[in-house]
Amino acid sequence: MPKYFYVYQNKTFGAEFHGGFLWSPQFANGWRPHPGYECMKEVRQGDIIFHSVHSAIVAISRARTDCYSATIPSSEFDEWDRNGWRVDVQYLLLPTPWIVRESDKLAMYKVQPSNGPFLSNGRGKQQYLCNVNIPVFEYLIDKIQKAQRTEKAREQIRDFLGCTPPPPPPPPPKKELQTIEDGCKVD
């Protein structure tokens, strides 16, 4: 069963999207471990990642590789140390990004794991990659699906995630017909 992650990519989304990867340094300034960078080491092939850019989920990806050690991928990453962690991913750019509102962040904060993406004040954490559990995954998928304007877009997301579509709603119950004395039936 895949694990789920949430990545904040404000500065680096373009380079990572076009290159088909996630990349983080291995350590924070001063060679200190950082939870967002340590989380990269947990990613395995098949895991699902939600991509946040300026408070909007703009893409979903599936890890094509386990995390591995890799040097800085390009000049867009020059502000960080050269040694890093990399995961190659397959991106699905969402036809309609979903804006994550403060109320959504607070709702997910209440059920997220300890290294989840949100703070108790309704803001996002200042870290690159965070863990997502099943309740947060389900919340995200529900909101992302509802944000899509077409059934084709929702189907594309379900296909990418390997989900089956929800069953159609049951037909409305048939009304009991009442018989009146002359034998006619009425609603």
Image (spheres, grey):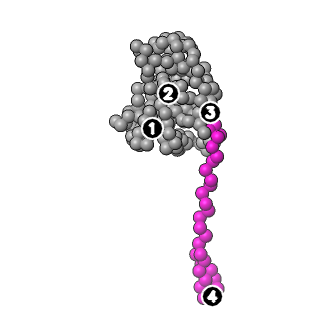
Q: Residue furthest bottom?
A: 181
Q: Secondary structure at mark 4?
A: loop
* Nearest to N terminus: mark 1 or mark 4: 1
Residue kind at label 3, given as amino acid type: Gly
* Nearest to N terminus: mark 4 or mark 3: 3
The residue drawn where x is 62% and y is 80% is 185
Mark 1: few/some/many CA within 10 Å (<14, 14-19, 20+): some
Contact between marks 1 and 2 (CB within 8 A): the answer is no
* Nearest to N terminus: mark 2 or mark 3: 2
Specify start and end residues of the magenta stretch as a single range: 159-187
Residue kind at label 4, given as amino acid type: Asp
Q: In the rendering, at what x and y percent does residue 128 appear?
A: 47, 25
> Relative to the observer, which residue lies in front, 119 or 149?
119
* Nearest to N terminus: mark 1 or mark 3: 3
Q: Is residue 42 left or right of residue 79?
A: right
Quadrant of the image for the C terminus? Answer: bottom right
| Residue matched to label 2 | 39
Residue kind at label 1, given as amino acid type: Pro
* Label of residue 46 in the image: 3
Q: Is residue 48 magenta?
A: no
For residue 182, which quarter of the picture? bottom right
| Residue matched to label 1 | 113
Q: In the rendering, at what x and y percent does residue 70 appear?
A: 57, 16
The residue drawn where x is 41% and y is 31% is 124
| Residue matched to label 4 | 182
Mark 2: few/some/many CA within 10 Å (<14, 14-19, 20+): some
How far, Cα to Cα, is label 4 from label 3? 68 Å
Q: In the rendering, at what x and y percent does residue 15 appear?
A: 55, 19
How far, Cα to Cα, is label 2 from label 3? 16 Å
